[in-house]
Image: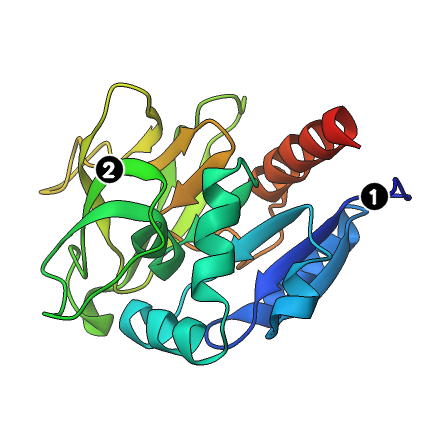
Amino acid sequence: MGNQAGPTIGVFALQGDVREHLRMLDSLGARAIGVRRPAEFEQCHGLVIPGGESTTMFKLARTFDLFEPIRQQIKEGLPVFGTCAGMIMLADRVEDGTPDQETLGGLDITVRRNAFGRQVDSFEGDLDFAGLDETVHAIFIRAPWVESTGPGVEALARIDHGPAAGRIVAVRQGSLMATSFHPEVGGDDRIHRMFVDLVTATYTDTD
């Protein structure tokens, strides 16, 4: 894939909140495309897996022949950013998953599905986020949290108050990033900018 004005970043578009991610990536100079077929995925220098319903996502990914190609590219170092359900999709281990739950894996973490409760328990809060000078206003919707991490995983943000204080809600491991919350909601593009920079550095090095 040759260089262009910006990297091509796909957003998994079979299920979940796709449009907000596409808009934010476009605003940061990336060529953002919805990914529904393997041919679209093959164009991508990076991938965003949005919030949605993780069990539906993996089933649709299998139905549309995207599951194995994405999993293989993750193993080969493709940068991927997962938000909310996307974090679950990238986790190697899931607590409170369905009996047939599958994940793409890649992040050496254990996540707990719907850890903060059901939709009625959705909430917002400000978080300190590694690498950013000012706090991030985070929106949690039936969100997971990270129960545990392997030695290669950096915790980027934690809840700092309330009964969930200390819980990890953002991580990075190599070319993979994930947040429990929805950074695409609202006008703060700093976390997406971090991912675009990661993708740009990766595809510049390899092209």
- For residue 179, say whether it is visible: yes
Q: CA distance from mark 1 to mark 2?
A: 30 Å
State the residue position of label 2: 109
Residue 6 numbered mark, or none: 1
- For residue 81, say whether it is visible: no
Give me the residue at 62% from left, 53% from top. Answer: 187
Element marked by disc 1: loop
x and y percentages locating residue 43 in the rendered image? 73, 57
* Rendered position, 67 above or below 95: below
Element marked by disc 2: strand
Which three-letter amino acid code belongs to the residue tagged 1?
Gly
x and y percentages locating residue 160 in the rendered image? 23, 31
x and y percentages locating residue 75 in the rendered image? 45, 40
- In the picture, the quarter occupied by the N terminus is top right
Give me the residue at 48% from left, 44% from top. Answer: 74
- In the picture, the quarter occupied by the C terminus is top right
* Rendered position, 57 above or below 158: below
Which three-letter amino acid code belongs to the residue tagged 2?
Ile
x and y percentages locating residue 134 in the rendered image? 52, 27
Give me the residue at 36% from left, 49% from top. Answer: 90
> Looking at the image, which is closer to me, 205 or 29?
205
